[in-house]
Amino acid sequence: AIRAGCLGPFGTFCRLALSAWFEGPLRKRSSRATADTQPSVGARMKRLVLFDLDDTLLAGDSDYQWGQMLIEAGVLDRATYEARNLEFYERYKAGVLDLSEFLAFQLQPLANHSRAQLDAWHAQFMTSKVLPMIRPGARPLLDRYRDAVTVIITATNRFITGPIAATLGVT
């Protein structure tokens, strides 16, 4: 079953809850079905549940908030960064975003600093930005699907979102 909902053109809240059933590894199916190629009637199925991160599990956008935290820490210039980020966002909404150009912009702050510094900033980011953004219903919803294969999908890079997913109990 697929359920999706969107509200508002700006700061769009889009939620995608996609669940599917699958039966372990895929087996090659021939044009003639035989007993050994069909799932047994009592075969145990595992559920796959996908959750969108930004503006769904979080009440905001993790990439945007990462940039804001770097601005507040004095790492990035507010006027320059926000103008460029808005430009990319407008291109994204228009469907003409050059992903390579955006990634070069988005990942530049990561490339310019040591891993130790990045980890320190990320810890600050989690405390000051992410934890307050976790929607009250996010954890109970994720808990409801602990027996399923649960995946968080996002367009934001793994450096920013990996620790967020771990905090939510999704590895």
Image (cartoon, rainbow, N blue to C red):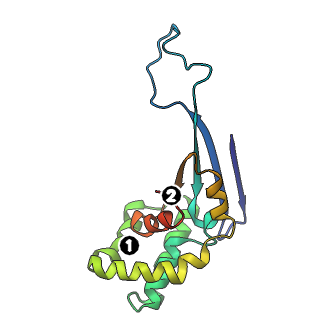
Q: Position of residue 142 (x, y in %)?
A: 61, 57
Q: Badge 2, how many Cα within 10 Å: few under 14, some, many 20+?
A: some
Image height of 118 relative to 156, above or below: below
Asked whether 118 or 63 is in front, the reply is 118
Q: Earlier in the sequence, mark 1 or mark 2?
A: 1
Asked whether 131 or 159 is in front, the reply is 131
Question: What residue does disc 2 label?
Answer: 170
Q: Residue at x 57, y 62 (%)?
A: 53
Q: Position of residue 115 (x, y in %)?
A: 28, 76
* Real-space Cα separation, disc 1 to disc 2, in angstroms: 28 Å
Q: Position of residue 20 (x, y in %)?
A: 61, 38
Q: Quadrant of the N terminus?
A: top right
**Which three-letter amino acid code belongs to the residue tagged 2?**
Val
Q: Residue at x 58, y 32 (%)?
A: 45
Q: Secondary structure at mark 1?
A: helix
Residue 136's mark?
none
Q: Residue at x 53, y 70 (%)?
A: 89
Say whether marks 1 and 2 touch (CB < 8 Å). Answer: no
- Residue 112 visible: no
Asked whether 150 or 6 is in front, the reply is 150
Q: Disc 1 or disc 2, which is closer to the eye?
A: 2
- Residue 42 visible: yes
Image height of 157 relative to 79, above or below: above
Q: Position of residue 125 (x, y in %)?
A: 47, 80
Q: In the visual, does 12 lie left or right of 150?
A: right
Q: Badge 1, how many Cα within 10 Å: few under 14, some, many 20+?
A: some
Residue 105's mark?
1
**Which three-letter amino acid code belongs to the residue tagged 1?**
Phe
Q: Residue at x 43, y 84 (%)?
A: 70
Q: In the visual, does 57 lie left or right of 109?
A: right
Q: Secondary structure at mark 2?
A: loop
